[in-house]
Image: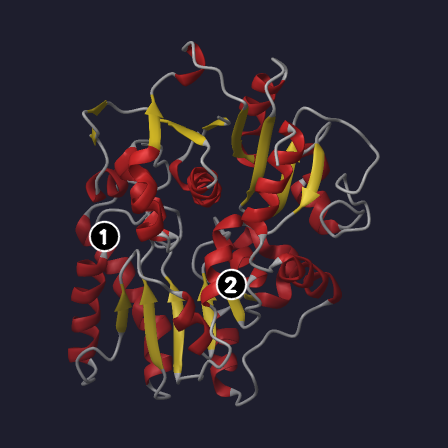
Amino acid sequence: MTSLLFLHSHLMYARTTIPVALACVQKGWDVTFQVNRPVVFGRSFGFSDNTIKKSPTNVNILNPDSYNWIAELIGIYQDWLSIHEQVHFSWSPLTQNKRFDAIIGTQKDIGILSQIAVQGIPTFALGYQHLPIIASLNSSSTTGNHNLDLQSIFFSDNPFSAEHKFADIVKNCKVQLNSFTYLDIVYSRKSKHSQQKNQVLIFCPGGYRGIISEPGQDKITCHKAQKALLERICLPLLNRNITPILKVHPLRARYHDVEDLRTLSDQIERENNLTENSIRIMQPLSWVWETVSESIFVLSFGGSGIYELWSAGVRNVYICGFEGTSRSRKFDIFDCCVLNSYREYENLLETSAAKIPNFDNLTDRVINAYQNLFDGNATSRVIEEICLQLGRD
């Protein structure tokens, strides 16, 4: 039986690997996930909402419960639950006698994976964040159909690829461009006839990230900053009869959760004589894609989720660049999508034109490159590549 090991240094990287693991189990393969917390009689310990809130930018608790949480986040919880008991969980899998036919992780852990690959074990790094690839770390061949595409926006000579050094990340790997595996379910559930509503979706930045609050700030400080932000963002929308929808960050900090935003939103509604629940709030693990497709535009605060939105063909996305700079500045290269001042935000709302940025050539090419890979078959291509490398059918 084909035996595969999945490795991660951060929990969120499992968004990419869990769809692949699910497909592997369905093929009858043996699947093991590395954990870093005790698992006793199938029960796992150490993962909860409180652990997320204490350190929202460094959630590296790996155990069955946290992997279940990821499956729910990406929308395949029931499928994952149906095979969960067939998945093995191991604290130190590489130090045990069990031999694995292949090791799978993401490009974020390519340094660790490279150390394994030199031992001769077939090793794969899958796309995550902004690099949509399948990389085989055991081959540095420069010929064939699946090697570095020097004509693509990701590896050709342009400011985007130069800024992120994509070619350096996958140096000495055999590379195939491939969409993010966790977007396959988005493709399969995507509505062909979405009805736009008078609403704007706002991806809350989550707190403790240098945008609205700093790590460790107290409740009073965090609530004051969040209320001020909500007033600046939501009131101009409400004054134009546009419904603000706040999507709570799955990795939210203390004092930045649903109940906090509800309390602050209630205050704003009362103080401005607004109807109750004029400001809508979405749960951290809610399926967001239907709301995305129905919104006039989407407002981000600079997270890498914009690459997922672009992949899925969502072009009416703006980056709020006037609230903090720690993350939005990472997107200066896409200045046409960044609202650099509050006045630019107000101007956007004042126009009756379509709420889609006027893309420059580079941004348009980048968006098209992501979207052209989005076909619902990213996981299948990973399985095909594994079979090819292992000589399986």
| Left or right of residue 126, residue 298 in this image | left
- Give the residue at mark 2: 187
Q: Is residue 201 above or below residue 185?
A: below
Percent of width and height locating residue 392:
61, 32
Circle 1 residues within 10 Å: few <14, some 14–19, many ≥20: few
Residue 295, numbered label: none
- Residue 311, by quadrant, is bottom right
Q: Is residue 302 visible?
A: no
Percent of width and height locating residue 370:
64, 57
| Left or right of residue 334, residue 235 in this image | left
Q: Residue at x 39, y 85 (%)?
A: 198
- Give the residue at mark 1: 221
Q: Nearer the viewer, residue 51 or 7?
A: 7
- Residue 216, by quadrant, is top left
Q: Is residue 340 above or below residue 128?
A: below
| Left or right of residue 85, residue 365 in this image | right
